[in-house]
Image (cartoon, rainbow, N blue to C red):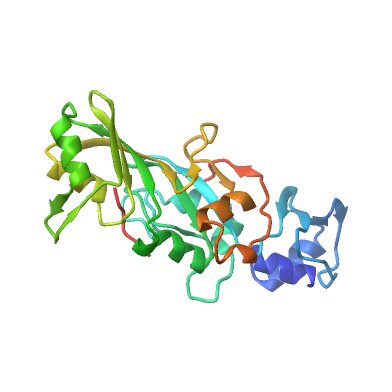
Amino acid sequence: MQLQDLLFSQGFGTRRVCAGLIQQGHVAVAGHPCTEPATDVEPEGLHYTVQGVPWVRQAKAYLMLHKPAGTECSQKPSAWPSIYTLLPAPLRQRPNKGAVTGVQAVGRLDQDTTGLLLLTDDGQFIHRMSSPRHHVPKVYEVGTDEPVTEAQLRRLLEGVTLHDDPKPVKAAACEQTGERSLRLTLTEGKYHQVKRMVAAAGNAVVALHRSSIGALALPAQLAPGQWRWLTLEEVAALYGGGAGTDRLSRPNLASGSPTGASHAVN
């Protein structure tokens, strides 16, 4: 693969822009400056820098973000800053076959909800994580307005009825973690599901944080607004070790700091 084509595939701009970056001496491969756009490189696992920032070539991008409060999971936010402004430009500009470019959030969280958010440009992975038939568990730490009661926990486990669905919706797991807090595990992704379930059980949500998705927990050292690549092992674990894992390449483990097709389920 030509170096300019590799940079294009990784979201560094049009091929002309990528060629310009190379010609102007802004790109180094394996520590060596390269000024020829047509230089042939082996893409698999390639380490390179662009304007001094290290990257590793990714066939597909998989990352986690610690979503802070006051941000929207939208490319076109209405009232709050977009989570996508927390990511470097190449991740937002990675070319896709469809009309949408860059990584996309796997599900959404409300602007006031914090915690683990996955992003990728792998449509199969998005489907795997979002499809109700796969029953991927998502764990939420919930702060409530009133003290949590045994009756409320029992209702959440046995099932509550939401106004737009006559079939009772159950929590996969539910436990009290404090006088006014509980841990709720869901395997579905209905609109504002956590808040509506807690309301139907007789309480109200005042704070909401997603702590894990499947086997992946939000690392304590990843601060709000920071992101990092998922490891190959983490992606494989989210896939359940099944179909799809053979397409994965080992991600770069560098993390990021703040820079500038589904419903919110909280």
Q: Residue at point 71% right, 65% down?
A: 7
| Residue 219 vs residue 53, the one in the foreground | 219
In the picture as drawn, the residue positioned furthest to the top comes out as: 179
Q: How many marks on residues?
A: 0
Looking at the image, residue 258 sits to the left or right of residue 55; the answer is: left
Q: Percent x, y for residue 185?
A: 33, 44
Q: Percent x, y for residue 148?
A: 19, 29
Residue 204 visible somewhere in the drawing: no
Looking at the image, residue 156 sits to the left or right of residue 202; the answer is: right
Residue 116 visible somewhere in the drawing: yes
Looking at the image, residue 22 sits to the left or right of residue 86; the answer is: right
Q: Percent x, y for residue 232?
A: 63, 53
Q: Residue at point 72% right, 55% down?
A: 56
| Residue 80 vs residue 188, the one in the foreground | 188
Looking at the image, residue 44 sits to the left or right of residue 119; the answer is: right
Q: Residue at point 18% right, 48% down?
A: 159
Q: What quarter of the picture does the N terminus occupy? A: bottom right
Q: Percent x, y for residue 11?
A: 62, 63
| Residue 93 vs residue 129, the one in the foreground | 129
